[in-house]
Image: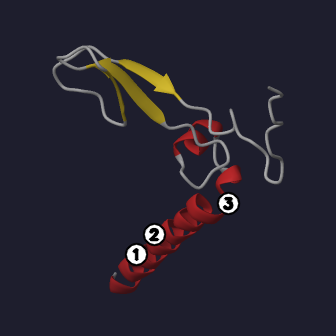
Amino acid sequence: MRQFLLGMLTAILLMMAAAAWVWTYQPERLPKEWRRANVNSQDYMPTLYRWHDAQGNLQITDRPPPDRPWEAVKIDPNRNLVPAGQLPKPVDP
């Protein structure tokens, strides 16, 4: 019985190690929804929260406020990027 439990524990630990390795180094093998939540993935889409404080100023944070209405904003990390090595064109006066 003891060998069986030790074998099961070893199998569980190996599966957890494999899952951690895939999560960290091979996120493209994960389901699409999981890739969006994985910081290591190209598909990572963080959620930000837009709300107004007591003075009416717009606030954007990574956590929603507990006492105010807020709007969830999905950010596409591939949007509004300037490719490396390309500078914006100068504006003629």
- In the current view of this chain or complex, which residue is farthest to the front? 93
Residue that carries the numbered disc 2 in the rendered image: 12
Q: Is 52 located above or below residue 91 in the figure?
A: above
Looking at the rendered structure, the secondary structure element under dot 1 is: helix
Q: Within 10 Å of the Cα at label 3, are there few (<14), some (14-19), or many (20+) other Cα atoms?
A: few
User: Residue 26 got which mark?
Assistant: 3
Residue occupying image coordinates x 47% and y 23%? 73
Residue that carries the numbered disc 1 in the rendered image: 9
Residue occupying image coordinates x 64% and y 38%? 32
Quadrant assignment, res 4: bottom left
Q: Is 16 located above or below residue 50 in the figure?
A: below
Looking at the rendered structure, the secondary structure element under dot 3 is: loop
The amino acid type of the residue labelled 1 equals Leu
How far apart are the two marked residues, 3 and 2, measured between alpha carbons?
Answer: 20 Å
Mark 2 or mark 3, which is nearer the start of the sequence?
2
* Left or right of 32, for residue 52: left
Mark 1 vs mark 3, foreground winner is: 3
The amino acid type of the residue labelled 3 equals Gln
Camera-side residue: 67 or 35? 67
Camera-side residue: 60 or 63? 60
x, y percent for residue 43: 65, 42
Are the two marked residues, 2 and 1, in contact with CB atoms closer than 8 angstroms?
Answer: yes
Q: Within 10 Å of the Cα at label 2, are there few (<14), some (14-19), or many (20+) other Cα atoms?
A: few
* Left or right of 77, for residue 52: left
Looking at the rendered structure, the secondary structure element under dot 2 is: helix
Residue occupying image coordinates x 69% and y 33%? 80
User: Residue 89 got which mark?
Assistant: none
The amino acid type of the residue labelled 2 equals Ile
Mark 3 vs mark 2, foreground winner is: 3
